[in-house]
Image (tube, rainbow, N blue to C red):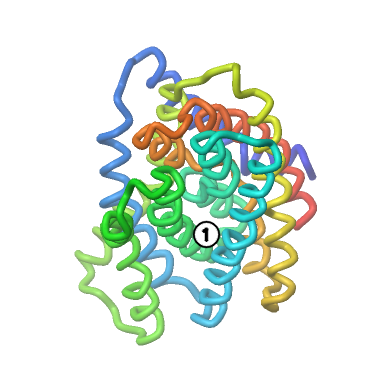
Amino acid sequence: MFLHIFGTVLLPIVLVAGAGYVLGRHGRLDPSPLARVTFYLFNPCLVFTALANSSVTPDLLGRLALLKLLTYVLMVPLTRGLAGRARLSGTASSAFVLATAFANSGNYGMSVNEYAFGADGLALAALCYVTDNLMLNSLGVYIAARGRASAWQSLAQVFRNPALYAVPLGIMLQQTGWSLPLPLARALELSGRAAVPTMQVVLGMQLAALPLDPRHWRLIGIATPLRLIISPLIALALASLLGLTGLTRQVGVVQSAVPTAVMASIIASRYNTEPNLVAGAVLVSSLTSLLTVTALLSWLH
């Protein structure tokens, strides 16, 4: 079961992301334009079409979004407390929280859930991605800036995410049974199909461009199990409290078990918040997750 899941779910991601890594390392290609196209076009189309065609009820979607939010409510104070006990500096403490609390549920998590659970799994994963992205662009920016970014700046970042608007539109279409004009529906579906493979290529290219520093290996060694083991355990407990079962529970737990978000490293770099520490956590957690996520999927099945 372990080898089957790795070969059918994780290995395809490794191969495509690996191709992106080679392009980024040896082709010296900048992932930023491709990442922006994915963020502003492909991802919103994927979120919209996945939710519009899903059979999942709004009640389950709401409880899943609440699970993700409560996971942050518990993970951020936990990692802040550990940083305080370790007497980390202000910037190192913020970087440690970024490395542990924020999940790569887009590039990595949506791909895993689509391959593992199919179209309904992808729809649920898309909602988790939107929730994670909102938290990263608000709470994550605040943590990285440590108060240097105003509340209005953080709020503006949140509302610049087009996937935010795709969620209610997709749910509305699903609930009303309306049909879009065929050319528009096909254009949205075609654009949405480009999201997952493009995100995997972007992930590899971004990993190739990350700045690494061996001085942070000790903290990275602490952050990685917090991200890959403690976070899904928290999500598992919350799923029981929220009455989530079946596919919704599986997706919620898996989306809490994925590696550190690449965007967390980009935000840390922007605000000069120990970006090497966050970048190292992204790389190490991404590699380690090949084992931990495979083991988790084996257990969930």
**Left or right: where 1 falls relative to 278:** right
- Of all residues, the one furthest to the bottom in this rendering is 176
Residue 145, image x, y percentages: 39, 44
Residue 47, image x, y percentages: 39, 61
The quadrant of the picture occupied by the N terminus is: top right
**Left or right: where 254 falls relative to 163:** right
Q: Nearer the viewer, residue 76 or 56?
A: 76
Q: Amino acid at mark 1?
A: Ala
Residue 201 visible (yes or no): no
Residue 93, image x, y percentages: 56, 39
- The vertical placement of 53 against 198, above or below, is below
Secondary element type, mark 1? helix
Q: How many marks?
A: 1
Q: Nearer the viewer, residue 159 or 273?
A: 273
**Residue at mark 1:** 125
Residue 21 visible (yes or no): yes
* Residue at x 45% of width, y 57% of height: 135
- The vertical placement of 296 against 119, above or below, is above
The quadrant of the picture occupied by the C terminus is: bottom right
- The vertical placement of 50 against 293, above or below, is below
* Residue at x 39% of width, y 34% of height: 202
**Left or right: where 103 falls relative to 177:** right
Quadrant assignment, res 14: top right
* Residue at x 39% of width, y 50% of height: 147
Q: Nearer the viewer, residue 15 or 208?
A: 208
Residue 106, image x, y percentages: 46, 49
- Of all residues, the one furthest to the top in this rendering is 26
* Residue at x 60% of width, y 66% of height: 70
Q: Mark 1: few, some, or many residues within 10 Å (few <14, many ≥20)?
A: many
